[in-house]
Amino acid sequence: MMKRTLLITLLSFSAFASVAAELSQYTAVRVQKANEMAQEDQFKQAITALKAIDTSRAYDQAFVARMLGVFYWQDGQVKNAITQLQRAVDSKQLQDEQAWTTQKMLADLLLSEQKFKQALPHYYQLTKQVPKKQKVDQLWLRIAQAHYQVDEWKQVIPAVDKYRRLQSKEELQPLSLKLGAQLQLKRWKDAIPTVEKLIALQPEKVNWWRQLVSLQMQINDSKGALSSLALAKQQGIELSQQDRKLLAQLYAQRGIPERAAIEVSELDGAKSDIDLIVTQASYWQHAREWDKALKQWQLAARHNAKYHWNVAQIMVQEGQYQQALAVLDKVKGRSEQVALAKTRAYYKLNQLEQALIQAKKADNIASSKQSKSWIKYLSQLRKVSHSQAS
């Protein structure tokens, strides 16, 4: 259907009544017969008829080459079509709209054959003088496409902008071309409004949201990235596990660890994946939600004994000294730290002798200012206690 429509359009511009005065009678008669064959889809016969024309007149040759180009294309012989159309264009014999439509068909065929660099000069020439009945906007879009295909990123953007200025509404393809060029040129800030327009066109497409967040992070706009990702979630965009983890990280970076913890708690495997459990515990701890942090560290410790230390630390901090002592007995390694933690727990339980034993143990493992301070302080307390008792 498209080929048939284009054929009729091209031939209508060269209606034989209007060009009869320019073509020789000999050529006009034969061209008319070839045209009638083409109207019946007899393209091979039409091509044979045109090739049989023997004329020395430059205009006749250009006109015949133009028609051959059209018929070769209709017959699927694109290479021959390009050769004939190029001959017609190079002759400079065709004028006005007839010349313009011929060159446009040549450019379009070169583009379709991925001969992008060859197509570009023709498209630029076409933009210089556009007939009233023709549109320039599609030319700029094809120029943008051709530059994009040969990685000429800087030329893509102005071509897209010229196309967009001629449109009443935004469109997906030109914006995608512009975004691709901006990303290749690392114009992160300029790319953000482009992605936002793409989101307005396809708000359900998660990749546009991801691209926006990525760009905002590239320019260190964590606040913007958080807002964008949170808005995507709010609007029901299907975010991946990785997207949700990033959202949690952004909440944490912006000083909202409780929201970060909630985001992680909603992930698949939040209660069984050790990494997710530890992440939740850390976020709750930063949020000073000690009960929730303790619960998560206890869950983590059931998966890996090394987290008993985190459990014990919070228990000591929260005054759960007796429970902390039991957990500290399960901690592997950290001998000095465990002894100091037990020192504090025993001290708080008013078991001074046990506290002093643990302080000395810590000092023997690795003498430190802290261990020596505890020993001095607890020894003095013991003296006072003994003197009061006597």
Image (cartoon, rainbow, N blue to C red):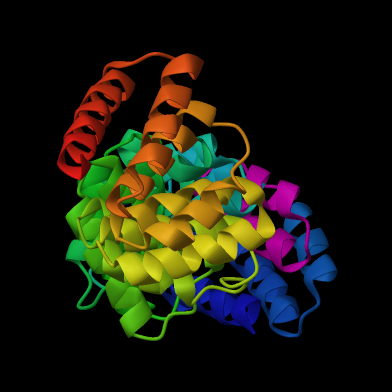
Badge count = 0
Looking at the image, can residue 101 be seen?
no
Between 201 and 140, the one lying in front of the other is: 201
Q: Residue at x 28, y 76 (%)?
A: 231
User: Which quarter of the figure is the C terminus placed in?
Assistant: top left
Q: Main secondary structure of the magenta part?
A: helix
Question: Where 365 falls versus 106 (above or below)?
Answer: above
Q: Residue furthest front?
A: 390
Q: Is 376 covered by the magenta stretch? A: no
Between 386 and 68, the one lying in front of the other is: 386
Image position, residue 336 (x, y; %): 47, 27
Between 150 and 225, the one lying in front of the other is: 225
Image position, residue 254 (x, y; %): 20, 55
Q: Residue at x 33, y 16 (%)?
A: 368
Left or right, 369 with respect to 174, comes to left
Q: Residue at x 60, y 74 (%)?
A: 268
Between 93 and 162, the one lying in front of the other is: 162
- Stretch in magenta: 54-83
Left or right, 268 with respect to 337, comes to right
Q: Residue at x 19, y 28 (%)?
A: 380
Left or right, 216 with respect to 18, comes to left
User: Which quarter of the figure is the N terminus placed in?
Assistant: bottom right
Q: Is 60 covered by the magenta stretch? A: yes
Question: Where 182 falls versus 356 (above or below)?
Answer: below
Image position, residue 185 (x, y; %): 34, 34
**Quarter occupied by residue 186:** top left
Image position, residue 182 (x, y; %): 32, 43
Question: Where 350 falls versus 155 (above or below)?
Answer: below
